[in-house]
Amino acid sequence: MTGRKALRLLFLAVALGFGVWAVASRWTEVSEGFARLSWLELGGSLLAVIAALGCGMMMWRALLADLGSPLAFPHAAKIFFVGQLGKYIPGSLWPVLAQMEMGRDHGIPRPRSAAAFFLTYPVYLGSGLLTAAVTLPVLAGGSVARFAWLLLLIPVLAAALHPSVVNWCINRGLRLLRRAPLERPLTRRGVLVACGWAFGGWAAYGTHLALIVRGLGASGPQAALLSVGAFALAWSLGFIVVIAPAGVGVREVAMVAALAPVLSQDAAIAATLCSRLIVSVGDLVCAGLAGLAARRSAPAVPVESPAGSLRGDQPKD
């Protein structure tokens, strides 16, 4: 066994260990809430999470392809979902380091992997805040008024995601690191496709939470729309407040506030805890399925052009 393979197996074992621990450690907190949910609601909620995670992978895949490294679905799924397990290991850089390492097998330059990874966050944040702005102010009213300042970030993020701004920032960072600039800059189409997948992800996450909320006593169009906005608001706020590891605590407060019009405080707290656990289970399921799918697929071999650069690095006509 090579040292590189041994390190990958060690990463996978450690990440899976922390992931399983994250699920097991919360079981006591959520067992009472789960007891109120039917198997149909639990199963549907998990399937919705898997769909949402799939949208996140497709968003990252679209950004990577636009930057010049298209990937077949099974290989993209393996790199993304296995790499995402790194978020359960203490420290913030494990997911991107894992994706950069696995991306090398498919001829993806490290700077391009890092650029695609970090671009997913402003896309998620901008689309999440817009989703919350559309679904919450009228339905949730005063319960989310304290978070109104987040709306000011929407135009800032919209401007920051303009391809000319993104490409300038990335190339500036690469220059400071003494790396070559991007061979293929991000395009407007790439940003729009990524945003489309992000909005699909928020809809799926909202469906996941709506099924939990339904099992805890609230149903109907208002509860469904509030669930979409509540999840988007909670994730966005948790990401912004970086002093809280993985948004723990901050996300729960935001979700409880957004669900206040349809659930009691105790039921809303139960919903947030159940949601966090189901999302963790979804991470583990997606990583396992992606690994199995990639093993059944032939490995991708980077193709060299006559100039010696990867074919994926060539600009569009």
Image (cartoon, rainbow, N blue to C red):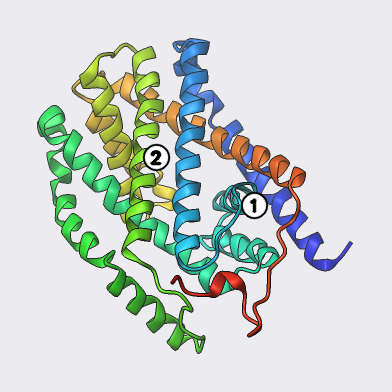
Q: Which residue is mark 2?
A: 201
For residue 21, say whether it is visible: no
Instruction: Residue at 55%, 26% (x, y): give it.
Output: 27
Dot 2 lies on which element?
A: helix
Residue 35 horizontal side relative to residue 257, left or right: right
Query: Outermost residue toward the front?
Result: 317
Nearer the viewer's eye, disc 1 or disc 2?
1
Label 1 with label 2: CB-CB less than 8 Å = no
In the picture, the quarter occupied by the C terminus is bottom left
Q: Which residue is mark 1?
A: 75
For residue 145, say whether it is visible: yes
Q: Where residue 187 sits in the image (x, y, percent)?
A: 35, 66
Dot 1 lies on which element?
A: helix
Q: Where residue 141 sits in the image (x, y, percent)?
A: 10, 31
In the picture, the quarter occupied by the N terminus is bottom right
Q: Nearer the viewer, residue 253 or 83?
A: 83
Q: Earlier in the sequence, mark 1 or mark 2?
A: 1
Q: Quadrant of residue 118?
A: bottom left
Question: How far is the residue under mark 1 from the one under mark 2?
Answer: 20 Å
Instruction: Residue at 60%, 66% (x, y): give it.
Output: 100
Residue 228's disc is: none
Instruction: Residue at 54%, 52% (x, y): give it.
Output: 87
How packed is label 2: few (under 14 Cα within 10 Å), some, or many (20 or more)? many
Position of 13 relative to 143 (above/below): below
Position of 91 relative to 28 (above/below): below
Q: Nearer the viewer, residue 200 or 40?
A: 200
How packed is label 1: few (under 14 Cα within 10 Å), some, or many (20 or more)? many
Q: Where residue 290 sits in the image (x, y, percent)?
A: 65, 42
- Tell me the amino acid under the disc marked 1: His
Residue 92 horizontal side relative to residue 236, left or right: right
Q: Where residue 198 sits in the image (x, y, percent)?
A: 37, 46
- Tell me the amino acid under the disc marked 2: Gly
